[in-house]
Amino acid sequence: MHMDITNPNSRSAATGGRISSLFSPHYGTIPLDFLMAGDVHACPYLPGRDAREEFFLAEAFPSELYHDFMDQGFRRSGQIFYRPICDGCWECRPIRVPAATFKPDKSQRRVLRKNAEVEVRVGAPRFSKEKFSIYSDYLLLKHGTLPDRTPEYLKESLYLSPVKTIEFEYRVRGRLVGVGIADLCSRSLSSVYMFYDPDCAYRSLGTFSAIQEIWFCTGHSIPYYYLGFFVSECSAMSYKQRFRPNEILDRSCNWISGQDGEAGGATKSAGRSFKQRSGLSPGKD
């Protein structure tokens, strides 16, 4: 990646005022002249609207630098790093939780009690046929049909990571019931995806896994837990705002309190295609 020095606050007219470079405390100023614009497509989150992303691909990428990219609205799917550039829209907005101040609400405490017997194992991501079977059943539960996914596809989309990534396994009496994938650096843990055995849907493992990942942050002195994008008008993402306190990235790429009213709405329209194309749903539950 080209990393020459430019003005860290410069903005590109081609991206509607979005920054054309970013400053990293670890890597200095990074020009964003390598970004590519994707095609306009139907928004996967808000029916009847169009969406578009700008993106780049990387086989290896520094985890600390990825944190700085997330603070400019980027996410990743496999080896694709992307952010929305939808015309006249800022509806897809990154959301994060300051881990040290998180307190489970009444509903989340019920989920914790319901899963008191669940064993959590954290380690390096390891693909297995058992995980692919659970992943396939999960997609069938979420989408009503089974997308054409192969074990190789799952390996490439979740288990081939260009950044430092860890895996959370959730087991009941030794039986695997859920899997969470998250990207790790010293400043954040970023949820990538979570899937679970549909027979355990009653356990609310999506909520349980998010709490466990937040607690992993507190146990390892990691300040923030990133939940991905939040779209106020997308019901599948409403669960993200229940993890409080939270912060939302505003249009100027500053983090603001999600309890100040900003999290409840932005402009109209949004979208992100890479997760939909990969079979990854927008939520944990």
Image: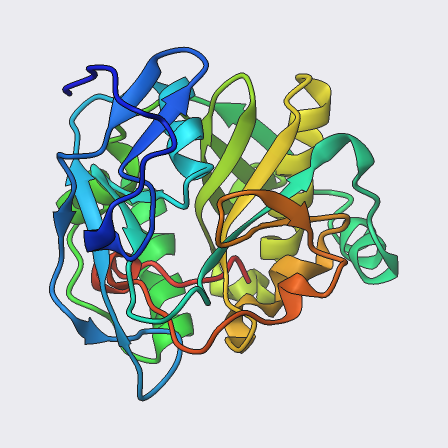
Seen in the image, is 46 located left or right of residue 155? right
Q: Which of 218/170 is in front?
A: 218
- Residue 164: name its quadrant: top left
Q: From the viewer's perspective, is 51 left or right of 195?
A: left
Residue 125 on image: x %, y %? 37, 28
Q: Position of residue 151 (x, y in %)?
A: 18, 47
Residue depicted at x 14% and y 43%:
152
| Residue at image point 63% right, 40% down | 173
> What residue is at 84 percent from the left and 53 percent from the top?
109
Q: Quarter holding the N terminus? A: top left
Q: Position of residue 83 (x, y in %)?
A: 31, 50
Q: Compared to 262, does 10 lie above or below?
A: above
Visual colour scheme: rainbow
At x 39% / y 80%, what residue is drawn?
A: 46
Question: Is 247 left or right of 102, judged from the image as shown?
Answer: left
Percent across and percent down for residue 167 are 45, 31
How many numbered marks appear?
0
Report whether residue 64 is seen: yes
Above or below, 24 against 48 in this view is above
- Which part of the image, by quadrant, shows the C terminus? bottom right
Task: Name the foreground residue: 125 vs 134.
Answer: 125
For this orientation, the residue located farthest to the right is 106
Closest to the observer, 165 or 151 = 165
- Direction from residue 155 to residue 26 in the image, left or right: right
Q: Residue furthest bottom?
A: 48
* Residue 126 visible: no
